[in-house]
Amino acid sequence: MARAPIGRQQLLDAARDELVRGNGVMELAALTRRAGLSTGALYHHFGSKSGLLVAIYDAFYDGLAHAIADTHLPAGADWGVREHERTRLFVTYHFADPLAPILLNRTAPDPQLTELEAVYIQNMSDNAADNIRHGQTLGQLPADLDPDSAGAYVIGGLRHGIAQQLRTTPSPTPDQATEHLWRLTAATLGTA
């Protein structure tokens, strides 16, 4: 595996920390001080502050896609069992990443990030729709369910549901949040 160029990963780590500390606000001076690098290093590696934020968003959503991939699901299980596990993985990923509440509860501070996030959400919704079609083919979901609308609804519901769970005091455990959100998802899809 190739190593990231010196300074790049330091900036990414420092930027994530600054975003969490600043509740979504990142000051360049604090960032470069935390990373122990110059502003020039930021521009060298990312081209701009927006480029750095894009790299952070990309890493978050790429990590999410990996975390919920089919390879992490029980082989041979029926559709509902697999998707319950995928929901658990989705929730656990968000609960484990301190950046998740910021990404889910705040509007992206940059139009480029808003567009990037929309692409990731659309991809997740499309994947969910394909997955729902598969459940219909197996006869485990109602045939009259519109997969595209249901996929978008499920992804939107999960994202907003997790955001709400992360704001709750005291915070539920990931397992409690999973059960709550799976119950709503299963009812929406007609598997309850």
Image (spheres, rainbow, N blue to C red):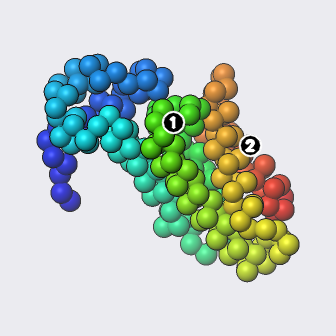
| Residue 63 appears anywhere in the view | no
| Residue 30 appears anywhere in the view | yes
User: Is 187 on the left-hand or right-hand side of 152?
Assistant: right
Residue count near mark 1 (Cα–Cα under 10 Å), binned few <14, some 14–19, many ≥20: some
The residue furthest bottom is 137
Answer above or below: position of 63 versus 134.
above
Give the foreground label among 1 and 2: 1
Tell me the number on the disc at residue 16: none
At 51% from the left and 36% from the top, the residue drawn is: 108
Residue kind at label 1, given as amino acid type: Ala
Disc 1 secondary structure class: loop
Quadrant of image for the C terminus: bottom right
Reading the chain from its start, which is encountered first: label 1 or label 2?
1
Question: To which residue does mark 1 refer?
Answer: 108
Q: Residue 114 in the image: x percent, y percent?
A: 51, 43
Answer above or below: position of 139 versus 62.
below
Q: Residue 39 in the image: x percent, y percent?
A: 20, 28
Tell me the number on the disc at residue 180: 2
User: Is 182 on the left-hand or right-hand side of 87?
Assistant: right
At 67% from the left and 40% from the top, the residue drawn is: 160
